[in-house]
Every structure is written in C-alpha cells, then in structure tokens.
Amino acid sequence: MSELIISISGMRGIIGENLFPSTASEYGCAFGSYLKKHKPDTEKLKVCIGRDSRPSGNMLFSALAAGLCAAGADVVDLGLVTTPCVGIMVRHLGCDGAAVITASHNPIEYNGIKLLLDNGMAPPKTQAEVIRQMYLDKVFGYVGSIECGRICSDDSADDVHIEKVLAVVDAGLIASRKYKVVLDSVNGAGGRIGVKLLERLGCEVIGMNIEQTGIFAHTPEPTKDNLGGLCEQVAEAGADAGFAQDPDADRLAIVDEKGTYIGEEYTLALSAFNVLEGDKSGAAANLSTSRMIDDVAARFGCKVIRTPVGEANVADAMMKNGSIIGGEGNGGVIDTRVGPVRDSLVAMALVLELMAKKRKTVRDLARQIGGYEMIKTKAPADKTQAAEIINRAREEFPDAEVDESDGCRLDFDDGWLHIRTSNTEPVMRVIAEASSPRRAKEYIETVERIQKQVISG
Ligand code: MG
C-alpha cells in the first residue's frame, strides 16, 4: 500500500487507500489552527475552497470544511472550479487562506489538497513545514460551539477570473480574427470556464471532454502521448489551434493548425513573447524550463530570473522583481496581473492575442522562437548517490556555468543539463536541452554513464 504524501506543496494520496475524510478534516483543522495562530488579530477567519471535477472532490470538501469550521474558520465554497480560480478568489474575497482539492495531472484514483495563503500563493517552505508538523502532531485548536465556522457558497469564481483575463488582452482584436479552436479539458475543471472564455474572445469552440465529470477521457497529463485525439480533431476540423488543459487547468499544452503537438514548453515562450514585447520588466522561470524564454527576453532587451522548480518559487521571484510574466516549462504560465498562479486561461488568451497581433499561425510563431531539442529522463539514485553523480558531472564539464539552487544546472554555449532529486522517491530527474538532438542526447548519455558507475559502486 502506498503512503500518503504530505509535502510542502500540500497533501496527495489515493482515495480509500490512504486518503480518508478523517485525513482531510484533520488537515483542515491544522490549517485553520495555523491561520488563527498567525493572524491573532483577525476576528473571524475566512477560507475559500475550490475543487476539481474528481468524484471524490465532494467528500473531501465536506471533510476539509468541517475541519476548518471546527478550528473556527468560516468557509466559502467556490464549488467545482480551476486551481487558478482559487488563487484569484482568495484575494478577491479577502480570505485569510484557501485550499484547492485536486491531484492535478495524476490519475483518477488520486486526490489531494493544496493550501494557499491570503496572497494567493502557496505557503513558503518554512511555513508549509509548520503546517505539516501541526497536522502530524495533531495540534488542533478546536473552538467551542459559538465560535464554530459556518459554510456559505460563492459561484462567481469563473466570472471574476474571466474578467481579469479579458482585462489584459485586446479581446476585440482576437475576436476580429474569428479563430476556430479545439479545447480538450480531459473532463477536468477547465471545460466550463475554458469554453466561456474562448467564446468571449470570439472563437468558434469545438469542445472535447469538456463535461466536468472527473472521469478522465485519456491519461490526464497534457503530454504528447496523451493528446493524439486532440491532434486529430484539430487537423480534421481545420482549426487554428488546439488547447489541452490538465484536470485542474493550471497547465496548457498547444497543438498547431496542422494538428502537430508543439509541446508545453512553447506555452510559456509564446506567452512571454506577447507580454515582453510591450513590457521590459523581465520574466521568471524555473531551472528546468527551456532556453526559448531567454531568447524571447533577449529579443526585447530583458532578462529571465531562474528559480528552483515549484510554482511558489517562480511567483515569489516575479513579485520581488515586478515581472508580469513567468512560469514553468510544463505549460504553467503565470501572469501576475491576473493572479500569482499558473493559469491555462490567461495562457490561451495570450497565445491567441499574439497570433492576432502578428497575423501568424501557431506553427509560424513556434518556428520563429523555437529550435531546441529537450530530453527528460528519470533514473534510480538516492540523495547520496545523486550528490556524487552531480559532482562527477561537474568535473566532466569544467567550463559550464553552474547553478546549484535546485540540484545542479550546468549551462553550456549550445545547451544545458539539469540534474535534481525527487522529494518523494529515490530517483534523479535529468533534463537536457541543446540546439541539436545529437548534443542533447550526448548530454543525457554522459549523465547516464556516470549514474551507472556510481550505482554499481
Ligand atoms: Mg495541474
């Protein structure tokens, strides 16, 4: 039986196996107690909760809300909404915190709870660790009858979110192009709001898997192998673009007008292309993100700050630097004008606006900024072995520029290598990108050779 994972980004487990109503209610109580301790002047705490479309979402909502109420926090039920909606609503409603019930791109048997603070961002590492410890030590500040929290609902999240997205693009310009778009929401949380937004942008929308049943129509991660149906549909319909969301709609992958999957890395690069042309505040991206964003930034005379992997790290760097655009190479675009969270909705709008401004197709725009080969691999290695592998890799490439803020990233003239360990399993992830497929393969093979030597002792 697998174990419930409680990390700094929240809790994730398998329903009926290690994730139960009692787990969620205690987690809610720990979060409520934490907020109470850190906001002693708040008369009545308010926490909003949203959930993706998984069938277990209702059960977890009830349990989580009960735990929060027991700790004295009022709960606002946002209903079945996307993860970015929750990040926006926590600020919009002036809540003291928020929770999202989702297991993101994981299969249906999973679910999870992500926590957000009043700024819409995940708690920083040290605070996340305090909440985790309060949950494990069962430090619950139960209140008496009169102070118990109450639950109310708010169904305005989609509209609030859509208005925020429409405010950052020229909707009239996009609408004048009358784009035909296929949207695959994998029956997750993004279908309803995705269709609504695209219609507001004047698109003809062909919806695929937009019913929010939580019964995923294909393996939910929006990667190439899982989006054959979308590619076919785009080609068949003669659409201008295909968009694929993950179940909680914080990631977006793009299919070009020929029905070719262009990959998630392009989502951030194209969005940044649009924003940075008119804004010089620069961008932020994690260390595993393609160099395309650096090329785009350089084109407009600005820079990209690199951060450790994790949405909160990127959002934090963006806030400190005053950047509008940033995100992660897995299709997670953050536009701080909309919210400090990865958001497939704003990504769709920015890509469509770029197409409209430039009068170019997705394929032409991708060609204009692309041209790298990226390879991602995973190999067994515990923390000690990984440290040794990184040391030897650094010796192998003495001229590389080194960044050790998250594992080790080695930058070369023609590409880069990023080696990092996992917090949840004894594996090492290796990503290489280079201007030719041959070079990318060579970088990966070098690490594989070292890994074999280290593992075999
Ligand atoms: Mg997600």
Image (cartoon, grey):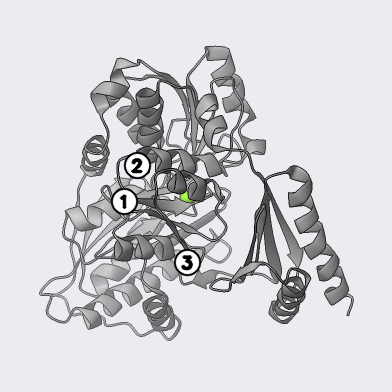
Q: What element carries label 2?
A: helix
Near-viewer residue (227 or 313)? 313
Whether residues under marks 1 and 2 lie with C-beta atoms below 8 angstroms apart, the answer is: yes
Between 419 and 192, which is closer to the camera in this rendering?
419
Q: Residues within 10 Å of mark 3 (few under 14, many from 20)?
A: many
Q: Which amino acid does label 3 sit on?
A: Met
Does 131 appear above or below 247? below
Marks 3 and 2 sit apart, C-alpha to C-alpha, by: 34 Å
Answer with the quarter of the image where residue 398 lies.
bottom right
The disc labelled 2 sits on which kind of residue?
Answer: Val
> Which residue does the numbered mark 1 point to in the structure image?
324
Using the rendered view, name the quadrant where residue 59 is placed.
bottom left
Q: Measuring 34% from the left and 42% from the top, which residue is drawn there?
A: 275
CA separation in Å, label 1 and label 2:
8 Å
Q: Earlier in the sequence, mark 3 or mark 2?
A: 3
Q: Name the residue under label 3.
A: 11
CB of mark 1 within 8 Å of CB of mark 3? Answer: no
Q: Residue at the spot x=37%, y=50% of the render? A: 334
Quadrant location of the C terminus in the rendered image: bottom right
Residue under label 2, please give it.
Answer: 275
